[in-house]
């Protein structure tokens, strides 16, 4: 969303307006991770929010689903299991990838990243799917009780 420069009354792109970039970045980061992201201090946090999520994740050309698939592949290859678990939970919750999609990702990546990494991914995927299905069942039970 573009803002207006109060001194010139002309449009200011959110790419040149740091507060708009930061707000857009915080919103996208929350969408990607599927939890509310609070603003934080420091240059590293600023680069993460404003550049990575405010610019890179906002670029045209790749869907959120595409970006998640690329990120999951990279995280598996690099062994970044901590953040990978967050991505798996979030993509199921947001509907970006289904349980079947993730199981297919496991099979595909196992052949490129190596069987031990694929086995670890399989375990993480099945844990995320079970957690997601349990949450859905709990919500369905609560809805039917009303």
Image: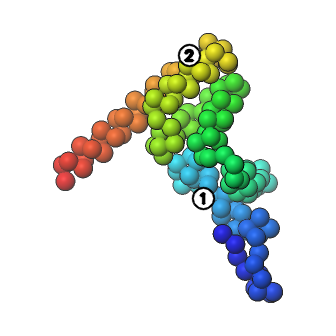
Kind of element beneath mark 1: helix
What whole-number distance in Å separates the C-alpha atoms at marks 1 and 2? 33 Å
Kind of element beneath mark 2: helix
At 36% across and 34% down in the image, what residue appears? 133
Q: Is residue 15 above or below residue 117?
A: below
Q: Residue furthest left?
A: 145
Report if the CB atoms under discs 1 and 2 are less than 8 Å apart: no
The x, y position of residue 23, in whole percent, is 65, 64
* Residue at the spot of label 1: 27
Instruction: State left or right for residue 46 relative to residue 83.
Output: right
Q: Which label number is shown at residue 119?
A: 2
The x, y position of residue 106, in whole percent, is 55, 22
Q: Which label number is shown at residue 11?
A: none
Please identify the quadrant where the N terminus is shown. bottom right
The x, y position of residue 128, in whole percent, is 46, 31
At 40% across and 29% down in the image, what residue appears? 130
Instruction: State left or right for residue 14 relative to residue 118.
Output: right
Q: Does any portion of residue 26 appear in the rendered image?
A: yes
At 70% across and 68% down in the image, what residue appears? 20
């Amino acid at each position: 969303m573009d803002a207006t420069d109060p001194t010139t009354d002309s449009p200011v792109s959110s790419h040149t307006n740091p507060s708009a970039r930061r707000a857009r970045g915080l919103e996208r980061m929350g969408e990607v991770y599927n939890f509310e992201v609070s603003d934080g201090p420091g240059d590293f946090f600023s680069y993460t929010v404003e550049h990575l999520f405010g610019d890179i994740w906002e670029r045209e050309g790749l869907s959120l689903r595409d970006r998640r698939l690329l990120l999951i592949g990279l995280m598996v290859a690099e062994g970044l299991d901590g953040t990978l678990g967050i991505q798996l939970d979030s993509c199921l919750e947001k509907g970006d990838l289904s349980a079947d999609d993730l199981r297919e990702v496991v099979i595909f990546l196992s052949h490129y990243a190596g069987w031990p990494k694929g086995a670890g991914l399989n375990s993480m995927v099945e844990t995320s799917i079970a957690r997601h299905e349990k949450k859905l069942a709990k919500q369905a039970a609560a809805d039917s009780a009303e």
